[in-house]
Protein backbone atom coordinates (compact mmCIF):
# COMPACT_ATOMS: atom_id res chain seq x y z
CA UNK A 1 0.00 0.00 0.00
CA UNK A 2 1.38 3.40 -0.94
CA UNK A 3 2.34 5.59 1.95
CA UNK A 4 0.70 8.96 2.34
CA UNK A 5 3.16 11.79 1.87
CA UNK A 6 3.68 13.81 5.03
CA UNK A 7 2.37 17.35 5.06
CA UNK A 8 5.26 19.78 5.11
CA UNK A 9 5.26 23.32 6.38
CA UNK A 10 5.65 25.88 3.64
CA UNK A 11 6.82 29.46 3.62
CA UNK A 12 4.47 30.37 0.77
CA UNK A 13 1.92 31.87 3.14
CA UNK A 14 4.48 34.46 4.22
CA UNK A 15 5.40 35.51 0.69
CA UNK A 16 4.09 38.91 -0.45
CA UNK A 17 1.90 39.21 -3.58
CA UNK A 18 4.94 40.37 -5.57
CA UNK A 19 8.64 41.02 -4.85
CA UNK A 20 9.59 44.46 -3.58
CA UNK A 21 9.40 47.06 -6.38
CA UNK A 22 8.41 44.43 -8.95
CA UNK A 23 4.86 45.60 -9.53
CA UNK A 24 2.41 43.48 -11.56
CA UNK A 25 2.77 43.70 -15.34
CA UNK A 26 -0.36 45.81 -15.89
CA UNK A 27 0.28 48.07 -12.89
CA UNK A 28 1.81 51.06 -14.74
CA UNK A 29 -0.94 51.05 -17.37
CA UNK A 30 -3.74 50.92 -14.79
CA UNK A 31 -2.07 53.70 -12.81
CA UNK A 32 -1.62 55.78 -15.96
CA UNK A 33 -5.28 55.30 -16.86
CA UNK A 34 -6.36 56.36 -13.36
CA UNK A 35 -4.25 59.52 -13.60
CA UNK A 36 -5.68 60.38 -17.01
CA UNK A 37 -9.22 59.96 -15.66
CA UNK A 38 -8.42 62.03 -12.57
CA UNK A 39 -7.06 64.89 -14.67
CA UNK A 40 -9.97 64.75 -17.11
CA UNK A 41 -12.65 64.59 -14.42
CA UNK A 42 -11.15 67.12 -12.01
CA UNK A 43 -9.83 69.50 -14.60
CA UNK A 44 -6.84 70.24 -12.38
CA UNK A 45 -3.72 68.40 -11.23
CA UNK A 46 -4.67 67.69 -7.63
CA UNK A 47 -4.09 64.22 -6.19
CA UNK A 48 -4.63 63.85 -2.45
CA UNK A 49 -2.95 61.16 -0.38
CA UNK A 50 -6.20 59.29 0.26
CA UNK A 51 -6.96 59.31 -3.48
CA UNK A 52 -3.61 57.70 -4.22
CA UNK A 53 -4.29 55.05 -1.57
CA UNK A 54 -7.52 54.12 -3.35
CA UNK A 55 -5.86 54.23 -6.78
CA UNK A 56 -2.95 52.03 -5.67
CA UNK A 57 -5.40 49.51 -4.21
CA UNK A 58 -7.23 49.40 -7.55
CA UNK A 59 -3.96 48.95 -9.44
CA UNK A 60 -2.92 45.84 -7.51
CA UNK A 61 -6.37 44.37 -6.79
CA UNK A 62 -6.17 45.13 -3.07
CA UNK A 63 -8.65 46.45 -0.52
CA UNK A 64 -8.52 50.07 0.56
CA UNK A 65 -9.18 50.31 4.29
CA UNK A 66 -8.04 53.67 5.73
CA UNK A 67 -6.59 53.19 9.21
CA UNK A 68 -5.85 55.51 12.10
CA UNK A 69 -2.22 54.39 12.18
CA UNK A 70 -1.67 55.22 8.52
CA UNK A 71 0.73 52.35 7.89
CA UNK A 72 -1.78 49.75 6.69
CA UNK A 73 -4.35 51.53 4.53
CA UNK A 74 -4.09 49.06 1.63
CA UNK A 75 -4.42 45.32 2.24
CA UNK A 76 -3.80 42.33 -0.02
CA UNK A 77 -3.58 38.96 1.68
CA UNK A 78 -0.75 38.96 4.22
CA UNK A 79 0.65 42.30 3.04
CA UNK A 80 -0.28 45.87 3.97
CA UNK A 81 0.87 49.20 2.58
CA UNK A 82 0.89 52.79 3.66
CA UNK A 83 0.95 55.28 0.79
CA UNK A 84 2.65 58.64 0.35
CA UNK A 85 2.64 61.30 -2.37
CA UNK A 86 5.45 63.82 -2.85
CA UNK A 87 5.70 66.69 -5.34
CA UNK A 88 8.85 67.16 -7.41
CA UNK A 89 9.67 69.50 -10.27
CA UNK A 90 11.34 66.61 -12.13
CA UNK A 91 10.47 63.19 -10.67
CA UNK A 92 12.84 61.49 -13.12
CA UNK A 93 15.89 63.16 -11.53
CA UNK A 94 14.72 63.30 -7.91
CA UNK A 95 17.17 61.43 -5.66
CA UNK A 96 15.46 61.53 -2.26
CA UNK A 97 12.05 62.22 -0.76
CA UNK A 98 10.93 63.53 2.60
CA UNK A 99 8.00 61.49 3.89
CA UNK A 100 5.83 62.94 6.63
CA UNK A 101 5.24 59.88 8.78
CA UNK A 102 2.82 60.92 11.48
CA UNK A 103 3.07 62.72 14.78
CA UNK A 104 5.43 61.07 17.23
CA UNK A 105 5.00 62.96 20.48
CA UNK A 106 7.19 62.06 23.46
CA UNK A 107 5.18 64.67 25.36
CA UNK A 108 1.98 62.70 24.80
CA UNK A 109 3.53 59.24 25.06
CA UNK A 110 5.97 59.76 27.91
CA UNK A 111 4.60 62.84 29.70
CA UNK A 112 7.69 64.91 28.96
CA UNK A 113 7.92 68.53 27.84
CA UNK A 114 10.45 68.81 25.04
CA UNK A 115 12.63 71.74 23.99
CA UNK A 116 16.18 72.33 22.74
CA UNK A 117 17.53 72.18 26.29
CA UNK A 118 16.88 68.44 26.31
CA UNK A 119 19.53 65.92 25.32
CA UNK A 120 18.93 65.46 21.57
CA UNK A 121 19.90 61.78 21.62
CA UNK A 122 17.48 61.02 24.45
CA UNK A 123 14.64 62.78 22.64
CA UNK A 124 15.54 61.14 19.32
CA UNK A 125 15.51 57.71 20.93
CA UNK A 126 12.04 58.42 22.34
CA UNK A 127 10.80 59.51 18.92
CA UNK A 128 12.09 56.32 17.30
CA UNK A 129 10.62 54.18 20.08
CA UNK A 130 7.18 55.61 19.32
CA UNK A 131 7.64 54.91 15.61
CA UNK A 132 8.85 51.39 16.33
CA UNK A 133 5.82 50.65 18.50
CA UNK A 134 3.50 51.76 15.69
CA UNK A 135 5.29 49.50 13.23
CA UNK A 136 5.30 46.56 15.65
CA UNK A 137 1.56 46.90 16.27
CA UNK A 138 0.83 46.65 12.53
CA UNK A 139 3.34 43.86 11.94
CA UNK A 140 1.47 41.75 14.48
CA UNK A 141 -1.38 41.65 11.95
CA UNK A 142 0.54 41.44 8.67
CA UNK A 143 3.57 39.40 7.71
CA UNK A 144 4.68 41.99 5.17
CA UNK A 145 4.49 45.75 5.63
CA UNK A 146 5.49 48.25 2.97
CA UNK A 147 5.25 51.91 2.04
CA UNK A 148 4.48 52.87 -1.56
CA UNK A 149 5.52 56.34 -2.73
CA UNK A 150 4.27 58.36 -5.70
CA UNK A 151 6.65 61.17 -6.70
CA UNK A 152 4.50 63.44 -8.87
CA UNK A 153 5.20 66.35 -11.19
CA UNK A 154 3.21 69.54 -10.73
CA UNK A 155 0.94 68.70 -13.67
CA UNK A 156 0.71 64.94 -12.86
CA UNK A 157 1.89 63.96 -16.35
CA UNK A 158 5.07 62.39 -14.96
CA UNK A 159 5.30 60.20 -11.87
CA UNK A 160 7.82 57.88 -10.27
CA UNK A 161 6.59 54.96 -8.16
CA UNK A 162 8.57 52.88 -5.69
CA UNK A 163 8.08 50.99 -2.47
CA UNK A 164 10.17 49.98 0.52
CA UNK A 165 9.76 47.79 3.57
CA UNK A 166 8.32 49.65 6.54
CA UNK A 167 10.75 48.82 9.33
CA UNK A 168 11.68 49.46 12.92
CA UNK A 169 14.82 51.57 13.38
CA UNK A 170 17.54 50.66 15.86
CA UNK A 171 18.12 53.82 17.95
CA UNK A 172 21.76 52.83 18.43
CA UNK A 173 22.44 53.41 14.72
CA UNK A 174 21.53 57.11 14.77
CA UNK A 175 22.87 60.30 16.33
CA UNK A 176 20.66 63.32 16.94
CA UNK A 177 21.24 67.07 17.08
CA UNK A 178 19.20 70.26 17.25
CA UNK A 179 19.46 72.34 14.07
CA UNK A 180 19.26 76.13 13.63
CA UNK A 181 15.46 75.92 13.26
CA UNK A 182 15.17 74.17 16.64
CA UNK A 183 14.17 70.94 14.95
CA UNK A 184 15.69 67.59 15.83
CA UNK A 185 17.74 65.94 13.09
CA UNK A 186 18.61 62.23 13.02
CA UNK A 187 21.87 61.21 11.33
CA UNK A 188 22.77 57.66 10.35
CA UNK A 189 26.11 57.01 12.05
CA UNK A 190 27.53 54.67 9.41
CA UNK A 191 26.91 57.00 6.46
CA UNK A 192 26.47 60.44 8.13
CA UNK A 193 23.31 60.75 6.00
CA UNK A 194 20.38 62.83 7.24
CA UNK A 195 17.57 60.29 7.82
CA UNK A 196 14.99 61.89 10.12
CA UNK A 197 13.60 65.26 11.16
CA UNK A 198 11.37 65.78 14.19
CA UNK A 199 9.65 69.06 14.94
CA UNK A 200 8.87 69.73 18.62
CA UNK A 201 6.05 72.08 17.62
CA UNK A 202 3.41 69.68 16.32
CA UNK A 203 5.63 66.60 16.80
CA UNK A 204 5.81 65.97 13.05
CA UNK A 205 8.14 63.08 12.20
CA UNK A 206 9.74 62.98 8.74
CA UNK A 207 11.68 60.08 7.24
CA UNK A 208 14.08 60.71 4.35
CA UNK A 209 14.24 57.90 1.78
CA UNK A 210 16.40 57.43 -1.29
CA UNK A 211 14.55 56.76 -4.54
CA UNK A 212 15.79 53.53 -6.15
CA UNK A 213 17.46 54.01 -9.52
CA UNK A 214 15.23 51.36 -11.12
CA UNK A 215 11.95 52.88 -9.93
CA UNK A 216 9.04 52.94 -12.36
CA UNK A 217 8.77 56.14 -14.40
CA UNK A 218 5.33 56.70 -15.91
CA UNK A 219 4.50 59.50 -18.33
CA UNK A 220 1.00 60.24 -19.57
CA UNK A 221 -0.56 62.46 -22.20
CA UNK A 222 -2.43 65.30 -20.54
CA UNK A 223 -6.14 64.92 -21.37
CA UNK A 224 -8.62 67.65 -22.14
CA UNK A 225 -10.82 68.23 -19.09
CA UNK A 226 -14.33 66.85 -19.36
CA UNK A 227 -17.00 69.44 -20.06
CA UNK A 228 -19.30 69.66 -17.04
CA UNK A 229 -22.46 70.24 -19.04
CA UNK A 230 -21.64 67.36 -21.41
CA UNK A 231 -21.19 65.01 -18.44
CA UNK A 232 -24.48 66.08 -16.85
CA UNK A 233 -26.28 65.63 -20.17
CA UNK A 234 -24.78 62.16 -20.60
CA UNK A 235 -26.05 61.28 -17.13
CA UNK A 236 -29.54 62.41 -18.06
CA UNK A 237 -29.51 65.02 -15.31
CA UNK A 238 -32.47 67.34 -14.79
CA UNK A 239 -33.95 69.36 -11.93
CA UNK A 240 -35.93 66.37 -10.67
CA UNK A 241 -32.66 64.99 -9.24
CA UNK A 242 -32.70 67.78 -6.65
CA UNK A 243 -35.02 68.22 -3.70
CA UNK A 244 -35.09 71.51 -1.76
CA UNK A 245 -36.82 72.03 1.60
CA UNK A 246 -36.13 73.83 4.86
CA UNK A 247 -34.87 71.88 7.86
CA UNK A 248 -37.76 73.00 10.03
CA UNK A 249 -40.35 72.56 7.32
Image: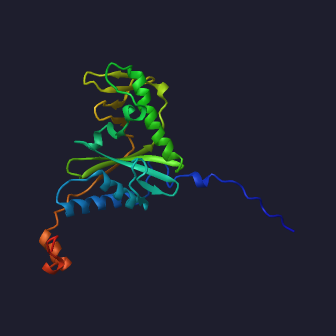
**Horizontally, is 152 left or right of 3 in the view?**
left
Figure quadrant of residue 61 = bottom left
**Observer-nearest of 247 and 209:** 247
Q: Is residue 163 above or below residue 95?
A: below
Image x and y of residue 80, in percent: 46, 52
Q: Residue at x 41, y 22 (%)?
A: 121
Q: Is residue 187 above or below residue 247?
A: above
Q: Residue at x 50, y 50 (%)?
A: 19
Q: Where the C terminus falls, by quadrant? A: bottom left
Q: Is residue 39 above or below residue 93?
A: below
Image x and y of residue 92, in percent: 29, 43
> What colouring does the structure picture have?
rainbow
**Horizontally, is 176 left or right of 90 in the view?**
right
Image x and y of residue 211, in percent: 36, 39
Residue 20 in sight here:
no
**Observer-nearest of 182 and 247:** 247
Image x and y of residue 25, in percent: 43, 58
Amino acid sequence: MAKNKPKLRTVEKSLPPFPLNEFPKNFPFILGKELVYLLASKGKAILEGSEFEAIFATCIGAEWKPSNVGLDDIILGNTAWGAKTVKATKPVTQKKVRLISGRNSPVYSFGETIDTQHDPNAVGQSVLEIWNERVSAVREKFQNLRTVVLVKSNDLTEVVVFEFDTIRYDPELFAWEWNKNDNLVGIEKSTTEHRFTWQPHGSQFTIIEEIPEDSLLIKIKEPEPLNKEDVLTALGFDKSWISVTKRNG
